[in-house]
Image (tube, rainbow, N blue to C red):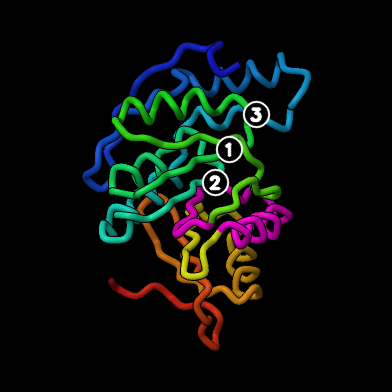
Amino acid sequence: MATAFPTAVTTETVAGLSFELEVVADFDRFLDQYLATVRDNLDRPPYYAHLWPASRALVAWMVERPALWPGRRVLELGCGLGLPAIAAAKLGARQVVACDSHPDNGIFLRRNAARNGVRVDVLTMDWTRPALRQPFDLILGSDLVYERPMVEPLLHGVLQMLSPSGRFVLADPGRPPLERTLEYGESLGLATTLHAEDEGFVIEFSRETASPAGRRPHTPE
């Protein structure tokens, strides 16, 4: 399915950092054809083939913090085209792993990493059943929480893979479950900070002690 449609290469510039990405040329047609012809795995539509605005918001947040990446181990969940993973590698991360549960995702991610001259390890994985044992300094995700029942499995999976001093950084366009994501993170003892970017919101979760109010608002950095 991943190679059944024409692709195009586009140049994306986010916060001054440029990327070349191979995408499906006509995503709407691709999605319609998929849903009309595929009889199995209808719960796995090919969303990986499209660049979503929340991933751009996450990369903007990343580029604004260049000192955060050198020497770090980074994991991107639900990576799709892998823009944040590629950005982490460009910004100097020591190791970058990108995973997605869709079995067709890897071909796009590998091509995009090579096109941008970086190495990204690719893994097919469902975050509710983590297959990684070594902890990560930073775990990234964008547009992962479409429905409220997705919140708890996501955060529990993240906590199994996050180092004791690590951060989970989630970008979201402002979907209804965003508030529940913040609340549930705080109920697990995570400190949260909410940032507003041009193309969405970015939440930092860390294991440090949360404030009495639970949520720490964004402050200038």
Q: In the figure, residue 13 lies in which quadrant?
A: top left
Q: Disc 3 on helix, strand or loop? A: loop
Q: Residue at position x 71%, y 14% from top? A: 37
State the CA–CA distance, disc 1 to disc 3.
Answer: 12 Å
User: Disc 1 designates what residue?
Assistant: 100
> Would you place residue 48 above or below residue 35 in this image?
below
Instruction: Give amino acid for label 1.
Output: Asp
State the CA–CA distance, disc 1 to disc 2.
Answer: 6 Å
Label placed on residue 44 = none
> Would you place residue 155 above or below residue 93 in this image?
below
- Report x, y in % for residue 25: 44, 18
For the magenta stretch, what is the residue range?
135-161
Q: Disc 1 on helix, strand or loop? A: strand
- Report x, y in % for residue 7: 43, 16
Q: Which is nearer the N-term, disc 1 or disc 2? A: 2
Question: Pointers 1 and 2 in contact (CB under 8 A)?
Answer: yes
Q: Residue at position x 42%, y 53% from top? A: 73
> Would you place residue 106 above or below residue 182 in this image?
above
CA neighbours of label 2 inside 10 A, class few (<14), some (14 to 19), many (20+): many
State left or right for residue 193 relative to residue 124: left
Instruction: Give amino acid for label 3.
Output: Pro
User: Disc 2 designates what residue?
Assistant: 77
Q: Nearer the viewer, residue 134 or 38?
A: 134
> Would you place residue 80 above or below residue 22 in this image?
below
- Report x, y in % for residue 115: 32, 25
Q: In the figure, residue 178 lies in which quadrant?
A: bottom right
Comparing labels 2 and 3, the label whose residue is closer to the camera: 2
Q: Which is nearer the N-term, disc 1 or disc 3? A: 3
User: Disc 3 designates what residue?
Assistant: 45
